[in-house]
Image (spheres, rainbow, N blue to C red):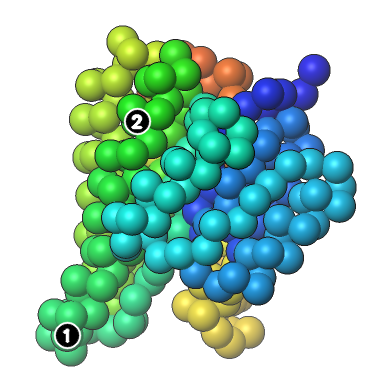
Amino acid sequence: MSRLDNKVAIITGASSGIGRAAALLFARQGARLVLSARGRERLDAVAADVRAAGGAAIAVPGDVSDEAHHRALVDAAQAEFGGLDIAFNNAGTTGPIGPLPALAAADWQAVLDVNLTSAFLAAKYQLPALEARGGGAVVFTSTFVGYTAGFPGLAAYAASKSGLIGLVQVLASEYGQRGVRVNALLPGATDTPMGRAVANTPEAREFIAGLNAFKRIAAPEEIAQAALFLCSDASSFTTGTAMLADGGVSINRV
């Protein structure tokens, strides 16, 4: 039996990177998927890849900072597949990179809207749906940046992603007795479009890779495996955690 047989999962940020890798992995593990991202064409392509491999997936394009989009994702899960068991809230943005005094208030707010307010909106609609199914798992993609290490130029990103961890702890406390587990996943440097935008030269990639214990950048599929653990019954006694999948960057000093 696969680890997600008969489970229905929402995955946001599913058109590329970690989200795409998670969609393909979760489908192979038996999940039926509701996929979200802003770009319809790439999202439809991921859904088509899932179906071509024998899985079940529908694409619901939209912006995670829009409350109506989260309602639509849950409605789609219930209408198409009968309910919701798992939510992997993975969409995010770094925003502009640079010193804080140069950051416009509108850009600060935009990063918080995508990375943190979207988590509130997701939970608002996902948690009642999960409770109606007798429980389930919610995972938010955070980061080690602002948690175990500070990176210059990423103030809004760090603040918003760190805020997710506080939200996770509260929701885990509130919903544990209702059968819902809530966790944060904290990747390190990963070979995604967003990661390549931050480390945009060979020298930058070499520097970033050198920060962790493995001296390399993770493949999206490796982070997807960590998400699978948190979303599956393998983590049945795990809730309220900030789980690092960072290659040891948080502890590496050599």
Q: Position of residue 94 (x, y in %)?
A: 38, 71
| Residue 133 in the image: above or below residue 82 | above
Callout 2: SS: helix
Q: Nearer the viewer, mark 1 or mark 2?
A: 2
Q: Residues within 10 Å of mark 2 (few under 14, many from 20)?
A: many
Q: Position of residue 10 (x, y in %)?
A: 53, 43
Residue situated in front as seen by the camera: 161 or 217: 161
- Circle 1: residue type: Ala
Callout 1: SS: loop
Instruction: Please identify the quarter of the rendering in which residue 232 is found.
Output: top right
Which residue carries the number 2 mark?
A: 127
Which residue carries the number 1 mark?
A: 104
Instruction: Please identify the quarter of the rendering in which residue 91 is found.
Output: bottom left
Seen at 49% across and 69% down, the residue is 38
Point out the residue furthest to the right here.
53
- Circle 2: residue type: Leu
Asked if residue 139 lies left or right of residue 112, the reply is right
Q: Position of residue 125 (x, y in %)?
A: 33, 39
Seen at 28% across and 84% down, the residue is 98
| Residue 197 in the image: above or below residue 121 | below
Asked if residue 10 lies left or right of residue 216, the reply is left
Asked if residue 146 lies left or right of residue 190, the reply is left
How many angstroms separate mark 1 from mark 2 (CA)?
Answer: 34 Å
Residue situated in front as seen by the camera: 44 or 100: 44
User: Which quarter of the rendering shows the N terminus?
Assistant: top right
Q: Position of residue 127 (x, y in %)?
A: 35, 30
